[in-house]
Image: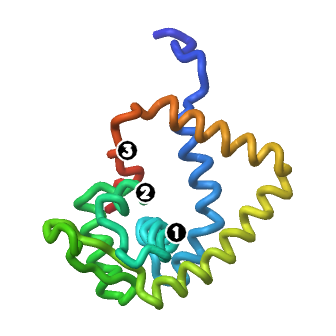
């Protein structure tokens, strides 16, 4: 049995997960106070970012932007609709597709939670400095672009609990 591992580089996926969990550790308490899961928040954030689109957001786009697989998204949307946070309807251009919109209650949650989240990001920026945070964003964007084939949308679900 060798005394050392054959790995030269640090475990990048684990480091990225650790970073995600460190950041989410500040966000989750606020989400839980509102009865939201991480997945529900990601959906609300996507819908909040597209709130100005009167046509709503097609579920496939929600899945891609919230990093949820279709079966997970279906369950998440069902619970969110039950809780009055979103509404679903058929796409007027293609009845086979479904569009989603945040309800006024959902948008109010986005507005309230965004204040807490943006305050945490401001704190991170104050600790790292704006140049380092800007560099971190740029490096992450570059890594994502490097690893993502240009013609393939992301299809992995970072969460295994839904």
Q: Which mark is residue 27?
A: none
**Along the line of sight, which residue is nearer the eye, 128 or 89?**
89
Q: Tell me the tag on residue 65.
A: 2
Q: Where is residue 131 in the image (x, y as percent from the top left)?
A: 83, 45
The spot of residue 111 in percent (x, y) is 60, 81
Q: Earlier in the sequence, mark 3 or mark 1?
A: 1
- Residue identifier under label 3: 154
Q: Nearer the viewer, mark 3 or mark 1?
A: 1
Give me the C-alpha separation between circle 2 and circle 3: 9 Å
Determine whether, in the image, residue 91 is placed left or right of residue 111. left
Query: Disc 1 marks which residue?
Result: 49
Of the two numbered discs 2 and 1 in the rendering, the one whose residue sits closer to the viewer: 1
Horizontally, residue 159 falls left or right of residue 51, namely left
Dot 3: within a 10 Å radius of its alpha carbon, few (fewer than 14), some, or many (20 or more) residues?
Answer: some
In terms of sequence position, does the residue under pointer 2 or pointer 3 come before the other? 2
Work out how far the residue at label 2 is from the one at label 1, CA to CA, in angstroms.
10 Å
Sequence order check, earlier mark of 2 and 1: 1
Q: Which residue is drawn at 52% across and 69% down?
A: 49
Q: Which residue is drawn at 32% across and 62% down?
A: 162
Name the residue at 84% across, 54% down: 127
- Please say if the residues under marks 2 and 1 sit with CB atoms less than 8 Å apart: yes
Q: Where is residue 119 in the image (x, y as percent from the top left)?
A: 74, 70
């Amino acid at each position: 049995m060798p005394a050392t591992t054959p790995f030269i580089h640090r475990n990048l996926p684990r480091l990225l997960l650790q970073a995600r969990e460190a950041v989410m550790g500040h966000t989750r308490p606020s989400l839980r106070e509102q009865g939201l899961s991480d997945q529900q928040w990601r959906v609300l954030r996507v819908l909040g970012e597209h709130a100005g689109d009167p046509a709503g957001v097609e579920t496939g786009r929600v899945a891609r932007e919230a990093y949820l697989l279709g079966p997970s998204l279906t369950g998440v949307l069902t619970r969110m609709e039950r809780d009055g946070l979103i509404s679903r309807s058929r796409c007027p251009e293609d009845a086979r597709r479904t569009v989603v919109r945040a309800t006024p209650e959902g948008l109010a949650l986005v507005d309230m939670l965004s204040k807490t989240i943006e305050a945490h990001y401001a704190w991170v920026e104050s600790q790292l400095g704006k140049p380092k945070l800007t560099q971190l964003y740029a490096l992450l964007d570059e890594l994502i672009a490097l690893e993502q084939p240009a013609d393939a949308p992301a299809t992995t679900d970072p969460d295994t609990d839904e």
